[in-house]
Amino acid sequence: MDNRLAKLSNWLKDEKVEFVFINSVTNIYYYTGFTCKPYERLVGLLVFSEADPIMVCPKLEEEQVIQTGWSYRIISYQDNEDPWEMIQESIARQRLIPTIYAIEETVLSYERSQKLQGLFPSASIVPADEVMNMNRLIKSDQEIKAMIESAKIAEYGMEVGIQALREGITEIELVAHIEYEQKKKGVRHMAAPPMALFGKNSGHPHGKPGVRKLEKGDLVMFDLGVILDGYCSDITRTFIFDSVSDQKREIYETVLEANHQAIESCKPGMTIGEIDRISRKVITEAGYGDYYPHRVGHGIGLEGHEYPSLHQDNGNVLREGMTFTVEPGIYIPEIGGVRIEDEVLVTKDGYKLLTQYPKELQVIEGNSSGIPEGV
Amino acid sequence: MDNRLAKLSNWLKDEKVEFVFINSVTNIYYYTGFTCKPYERLVGLLVFSEADPIMVCPKLEEEQVIQTGWSYRIISYQDNEDPWEMIQESIARQRLIPTIYAIEETVLSYERSQKLQGLFPSASIVPADEVMNMNRLIKSDQEIKAMIESAKIAEYGMEVGIQALREGITEIELVAHIEYEQKKKGVRHMAAPPMALFGKNSGHPHGKPGVRKLEKGDLVMFDLGVILDGYCSDITRTFIFDSVSDQKREIYETVLEANHQAIESCKPGMTIGEIDRISRKVITEAGYGDYYPHRVGHGIGLEGHEYPSLHQDNGNVLREGMTFTVEPGIYIPEIGGVRIEDEVLVTKDGYKLLTQYPKELQVIEGNSSGIPEGV
């Protein structure tokens, strides 16, 4: 059995859990290499403590499961068949009467949890979320390599975006151009829709690109990330278009200092909450504490946002091989926002940045040519 | 209160359910107009039988909730705060001790359902999925208008794709080009990643575009859909590049006949399963029954795939105002696949197609220019 599956099966043995039902697309990919498109159809992976794993998938996905090299049993079903009955039969055939099974409590729907409880009414349920988060938490060298390549494409998008800045371009034109250029590099999916926000629009941390036209003096915030070979990237940089006011410069320098100090603190043993608090202290002391309405960052890997959450009360500690974002920001609705986000890898005695794009304040002069002709 | 919310509140009164907790991004949008980006953070809408609704959202989304015109209470929380405690307090302040509440059983995670059960341990749970599906099932004239506009952009992508066909172009180049051209029209999100599959790759109903190069004689399958003003489109057409074999022509004509007969049958009162069976009969009689591994279609609206599922055993009937896809297909791994998909609206005495793209077999001659220079 593959290493990752074997590790999970061993956890089941240790915990005396007979099987785990895995339903999240990402975890199925992590343990099997199979990228499924379930839509509303059921795709599931059953991993047992004492037997070979079983994949459950719609008939129309079966061929693709086989193509990923899956050599164990597949339960495949037509759209008018009930996969739950097939799961029940299959487990009964193993002469297994489960007493404890595990699910992804944060992912599995209430309805599906009820289906399982209907199949095994006398069994109790334990969460498998944490063990799978912990399996995925520490990245291998190969995973780090994939994440660096993914970050490079995100940064390439930043270059493309800056080159295309000109007075009057809209946010939505800009993000379409960035995404297209990234996809021409072989990217198939964005980790999140590319974000380019101008002026006041950047004053909303989760703003949406629209038809706002770029004006002189605007803050320009790019938040970009792609998925490459399964691994996500996520980088934010903020620029000023044409000319910068003293206040915008002050906000920028404050966020940059918060980004620097928080990242500099990263090393094994450091408390996660402390990273947030360091960034928050810089911003609060500069008088902008009320304008920093989010945590300093989040884990990243197969998902753009994954375990852990880097909020100020998180008492867990950093470990070598963890990867996460550090992204303090200040958002003032009437002026705009600045966020500077990097991806950090915890190393043996400190950290390494997976994102390399320069962070010093850049005032971008309008490029009269903008997006190349004919595009 | 807005009509849609009032209708839901009335359902609660009728069913003697004190409140519903809505967690799905789509349903929150349907009832409030708020498009949230929750990631792993909790966004929820509480609708009561006897009180005003409450929105629960992260602090960093609050401003955007207000911008959508939300005039009721908002419970907003920081990343280190517990929104569940705030929900509990807020309900206690109403002097409400719930005895029955509703959730989206197919959407809400097991963990979140447990959180609610922890807050209200003596209350029982009922599903709200069906009532919300039924609320969304019958589309208003305004919704139909939005769906037609969305379908037009999907069809524009088809035009763009055909224009770009030339020997040697890869699937992934082609879909990047299509998506870019659609986004230049103001589309922000795809309903699903655009699909272009060549030759044998089209033999997998859920295949993924890759680096396969277009060759003479290839089947070329496009499955395209965008989201415009919240509404999804979904259309599939299959073409032949350069020259067509007799077998491919036979497959094509069989699928086209199945598409025609299934669509022609649509009218109020018709059993949903019958639509599938009509399409399946055509394909089975032509000897390809084993190569049609999926249902004939699915509902479409705010979601690309939504209620109902058009599988052969669905005994529900069509009603005026329902919108769904009809998309029979034949997939032969060694040859390729043909799928022809339209969006159908049930009218007072029949149906109307929301997709208009021609369906007769088209043999596309290689366009030597392909994607315009400089792109």
Image: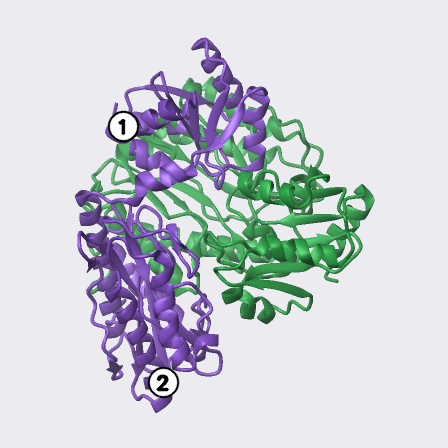
Chain colours: A purple, B green
- Which numbered tag is attached to residue A67? 1
The chain letter for the residue carrying disc 1 is: A
Mark 1–mark 2 Cα distance, whole angstroms, equals 53 Å
Q: Please identify, in this view, whether the residue under mark 1 or under mark 2 is nearer the observer.
A: 2
Nearer-the-camera pick, B331 or A155 = A155
Quarter of the image for residue B180 reads bottom left
- Report whether residue A337 is seen: no
Would you place residue B337 above or below residue B375 in this image? above
Q: Residue extending furthest bottom?
A: A246
Q: For this view, does A320 lie left or right of residue B225?
A: left
Nearer-the-camera pick, B136 or B41 = B41
Residue A23 coordinates in the image, percent (x, y): 44, 34
Q: What residue do we see at 26% from left, 73% from top?
A: A162
Q: For this view, does B329 lie left or right of residue B129?
A: left
Label 1: which secondary element: helix
Q: Report the amino acid beneath label 2.
A: Lys
Nearer-the-camera pick, A160 or B215 = A160
Residue A176 coordinates in the image, percent (x, y): 34, 64
Label 2: which secondary element: helix
Of mark 1 and mark 2, the one earlier in the sequence is: 1
Quadrant location of the N terminus of chain A in the rendered image: top left
- Which numbered tag is attached to residue A248? 2
